Image (cartoon, coloured by chain):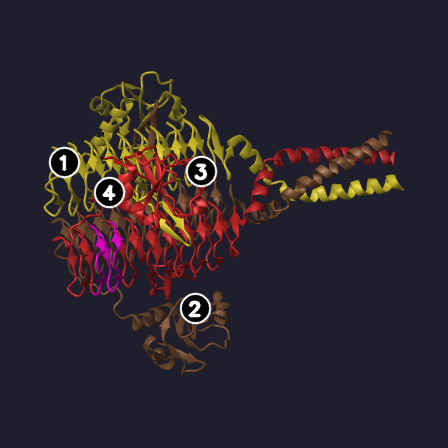
Chain colours: A brown, B yellow, C red
Amino acid sequence: MEIRLDELARIVGGEISGDPSVVITGVAGIREARPGDITFLADPRYGRYLESTAASAVIAPRDTARTSKPLIICENPYLSFIKAVEYFFPDRNSYPRSVHHSAIVADSARIGKGVAIGACTIIEEDVEIGDNSLVLAGTFVGRRTSIGSNCLIYPNVTIREETRIGNRVIIHSGAVIGSDGFGFVRDGEIYRKIPQVGNVVIEDDVEVGANVTIDRATTGTTYIGRGTKIDNLVQIGHNVVVRDNCIIVAQVGIGGSTEIGAGATIAGQAGIIGHVKIGEGSVVAAQAGVVGDVAPGAMVSGYPARNHKQAKKIYASLQKLPDLLKRVAELAERVARLERGRRS
Amino acid sequence: MEIRLDELARIVGGEISGDPSVVITGVAGIREARPGDITFLADPRYGRYLESTAASAVIAPRDTARTSKPLIICENPYLSFIKAVEYFFPDRNSYPRSVHHSAIVADSARIGKGVAIGACTIIEEDVEIGDNSLVLAGTFVGRRTSIGSNCLIYPNVTIREETRIGNRVIIHSGAVIGSDGFGFVRDGEIYRKIPQVGNVVIEDDVEVGANVTIDRATTGTTYIGRGTKIDNLVQIGHNVVVRDNCIIVAQVGIGGSTEIGAGATIAGQAGIIGHVKIGEGSVVAAQAGVVGDVAPGAMVSGYPARNHKQAKKIYASLQKLPDLLKRVAELAERVARLERGRRS
Amino acid sequence: MEIRLDELARIVGGEISGDPSVVITGVAGIREARPGDITFLADPRYGRYLESTAASAVIAPRDTARTSKPLIICENPYLSFIKAVEYFFPDRNSYPRSVHHSAIVADSARIGKGVAIGACTIIEEDVEIGDNSLVLAGTFVGRRTSIGSNCLIYPNVTIREETRIGNRVIIHSGAVIGSDGFGFVRDGEIYRKIPQVGNVVIEDDVEVGANVTIDRATTGTTYIGRGTKIDNLVQIGHNVVVRDNCIIVAQVGIGGSTEIGAGATIAGQAGIIGHVKIGEGSVVAAQAGVVGDVAPGAMVSGYPARNHKQAKKIYASLQKLPDLLKRVAELAERVARLERGRRS
């Protein structure tokens, strides 16, 4: 499939800057794009990628800096880019908007208009699913759970009872929402289970990765704020609160009752202990081990996690540690020699 | 839902100490409880939580220290607490005790009394399921596997062939029990698979978290002892032996053939190499990297994991390392100056 | 089940060296074997295990060093060992080669000869499955995906649309192949999803562990090379390229667009940042945090990952750091004393 840039500009709604005859053969993110692709720039702050991207053209906002790249200039580059994606991949997510004959849907479930329920999907009593949502094959939705409109629940997801999911939420395969929190109390040698009777609330525009686990609260709610994006294999403990627009990268673990402030980024494989506060807009580096609160806007790294600048200094110093040991031993000898000299 | 403390005491079986007119509106663990909740104290050792909990009242054993909190004093606080949970959440886990018409159950399977088999659940040949167990929707149980009585297997669990599961075991969604161990042998450039023909045995009262993986043994048995509790996304390798009453927190990885002693605690994201012994009652701290045996009762942390007190000292010292480098360089200069002075 | 070694030699095809009357009761890998087991040695380089294994006999190649162990000497020890496994476990993987009546298979799917499709399995439009492959219960295979011949897809796997899987591939339960890459672009406060329109390609003889996640590419392909073996709970990001015959141990995370060279070993819980190159034949130690390229043949460990020899020295030196701080403070005092002495 190929199209001239000026033709594509007409389809996605925008004006050409640069060569209108460039041929476009695909779409991609600005860092992954290859020659022939068109990409987009949502935020002029990332204008530096304009020159380095391998894309043949970029959909960009009005105030974009001069560049040698052919551009499609438009009001909302993201929406125009999505139109370009639809042009190249016309049948993505085109599912029959109906309940598959093999699905098991409780009579008391309320299913909106334009909803697709996949094969062998199980919808229990008193579930509510909003208009135009897709709940694909093999997914389980427990009692009294509500799913908003325009959601996309991929195959083989498990959503347990009483979960509340907003609109335009995407949940990838294998994710488990609302499993019991890990709550026990010691009774002599053995552990007694604390019943986990709270729930999980996921706000609008959240994305939950494949094989993620989000535990229900002991009591009350485990909460994922609007617009937060969660990568694969992340563990979110009971009673955790993640505020809006956070980025949580793959294999992160967040201990029970911890709160992640809005706009925070938790990088891959980081672990955060329970019962702490991670400040708004802060960054926890990959593999960091956070054992206390993190201030708003701070960046922390290492184990135990510290201010990132300090941690970087420490980890750079480490390289010199074996040599330092030798040097100090040698210095001690020289000092001893001086002391002996003085006494003699 | 609300109830006076004295009325609740009558229902759960106990005597009031303190204000009998307190109104209770819910239940919670002692650390998660909020005003209005009732909680419980199973072990007098945790009496310190009595004053700090936000709960409005506590179900406590006879020998509990004096406190300003209203108490329900009883023989077995845990059982009384469970009665309180049942009062507030009367229909938890109330599933029709029957085989759902969409379940696929082999003729040779022996299903006990009062068992619930969920929708689209698959029970293969020669499976045995004990009385009053729940095997919920979409779960797969492979050939010759046995599940004891009063178990709760959540939706979308996979239990492969020949697994043996005891009584009162809880397995959360997405868990995979009995997948092949990771066993290969190098043959020139390529790796040849070693067939994994052992099994998994899970004893009574174990809980297995969501998306946990427990590999079957190469030969013999991967073993999870009675009362052990495993959090989400934990990996347990082939031929691992976990003894009784261990706590294994989320995202821990345990290498093949390692043995975890009774009553050990392995905190979140810790990794333990294969073929080592973790002593009885020991504690492995979060994110620790264990590369050798751990003595009974020891606590280890860091990478590579060391005695926790020593590791704490090291990690505290790290902070001073960049400064130390400067100080040693400066000292070296001063010593050189002294040496020059002496020679002159 | 038991058999004399000479009888077994006849069945698996080989000649006896040592006592032909040894009784064999099972099979196992060379490290896991117990008395009574027969094991195998594929590569004479691992001859050191010959003496330490507890196995009662070993299937070994012609050029194996002298040993006190009874051997079955043969051309291809691995193939002979597989015959021994089949002798002791005759009905492993014997599934009816048909489509289960509860499976949902699209009319447009092309299913080869001798294929088993399990209960409640879903095969979408235009899927292709090669001869003699097993796709077991509850698995989902999305549109236009192709699976080669002699594959073994365990229950409750999710394979999304347009995935290409080679021959003799094994995928364990709960694995998710082709979930969306984690690609977003910041637009002011919020994150916009970059549609993930690439796919996943898995070459011949790959094994994918339980609850692994392999994301589809943003555009182009996430690639797993021939013969690579992936353990449980591993995360492979979008556009990652893993070359042939790699070993990726449990809970490893590999960031987007990173390339792993042929024959590399990534040990458990290691994390590799996106957009780097891990050289051919290199080794990344357990829990390492790799933040840059790794040279071919190198071994790295620690956080941030460094040359393993250097890292080992550093981690050994760490032990001496608290003491070093004291010694330097003491040295500084002695130097100050010397300086005072000189001035006086």
Magenta span contains residue B32:
no
Q: Chain of mark 4?
A: C
Distance (Cα) linking label 2 and label 1: 57 Å
1 and 4 marks on the same chain: no
Distance (Cα) linking label 4 and label 2: 62 Å
Please tell me which of labels 3 and 1 falls first in the chain.
Answer: 1
Q: Is residue A43 above or below residue B31?
A: below
Q: How busy is the neighbourhood of tag 1: few (under 14 within 10 Å), some, or many (20 plus)?
A: many
B267 left or right, relative to A101: right
4 and 2 marks on the same chain: no
Mark 2 or mark 3, whichever is nearer to me: 3
Give coordinates of residue A69: x percent, y percent.
Answer: 47, 76
Disc 1 target residue:
B115
3 and 4 marks on the same chain: no
Disc 4 target residue:
C87
Q: Chain of mark 1?
A: B
Residue type at mark 4 is: Tyr
Distance (Cα) linking label 2 and label 3: 40 Å
Callout 3: helix, strand or loop?
loop
Distance (Cα) linking label 3 and label 4: 44 Å
Disc 3 target residue:
B286
Q: Is residue C258 above or below residue C288?
A: below
Q: Nearer the viewer, residue C122 or B1?
A: C122
> What residue is drawn where x is 85% and y is 32%?
A342
Residue C165 is at least partly visible in this image: yes
C274 left or right, relative to C194: right
Q: Looking at the rendered structure, which numbered label has been put on residue A327?
A: none
Secondary structure mostly seen in magenta is loop
C128 left or right, relative to A74: left
Give coordinates of residue C200: x percent, y percent.
Answer: 33, 61
2 and 3 marks in contact (CB < 8 Å)? no
